[in-house]
Amino acid sequence: MTEKTLAIIKPDAVRKKFSGAILARYEKEGFRIRAIKMRALSKAEAEGFYAVHRERPFFSSLVSFMVSGPVILVVLEKDNAILDHRTLMGATDPAKAEKETLRALYGESIEYNAVHGSDSGETAAFEIPYFFSTVELIG
Ligand code: CMP
């Protein structure tokens, strides 16, 4: 089934100039880019986006990281996009991620892990409209 998922190239990866390599990899792996923009997130935007994690001990650190520099927000589409993007990203902790996954290649720690991806259809249905309006989405 054709699905859309939200990807975020996080501040660490943007700072290290990995954005181009990550976007190229998405296209190589068969994802279509349906919307894209660079944003400097506000604290409130980052807190709202990660609201499910607000009770976690790492929440305030995660929010500080996500506002530490611009991010690239991307809507990706393909068959099985949500799971396939999670497989392509690898485990949350880059040290545990499979070789050649985005986090193994570009992440440096469980927090500075280069990319985010929606983890379910329900999450994608919250995350995509959080950042993109209908007129900004192709297809
Ligand atoms: P992401 O997939 O964007 O979802 C939540 C983020 O919180 C995660 O990637 C990491 O950046 C961060 N995170 C998850 N677990 C931890 C942890 N144990 N310590 C610090 N940051 C974490």
Image (cartoon, rainbow, N blue to C red):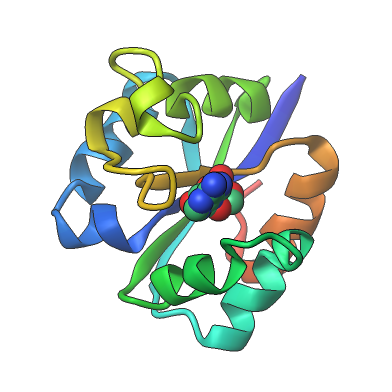
- Near-viewer residue (24 or 139): 24
Q: Is residue 114 left or right of residue 53?
A: left
- Image position, residue 39 (x, y; %): 41, 75
Quadrant where the N terminus sits is top right
The answer to whether residue 77 is above or below residue 96 is below
Residue furthest top in the image: 99
- Near-viewer residue (73 or 33): 73
- Image position, residue 77 (x, y; %): 59, 34
Residue 7 in view of the camera: no
Residue furthest right in the image: 122
The answer to whether residue 71 is above or below residue 84 is below
The answer to whether residue 112 is above or below residue 31 is below
- Near-viewer residue (77 or 97): 97
- Near-viewer residue (84 or 43): 43
Q: Is residue 1 left or right of residue 43?
A: right
Q: For residue 121, what is the image quadrant?
A: top right
- Image position, residue 30 (x, y; %): 44, 20
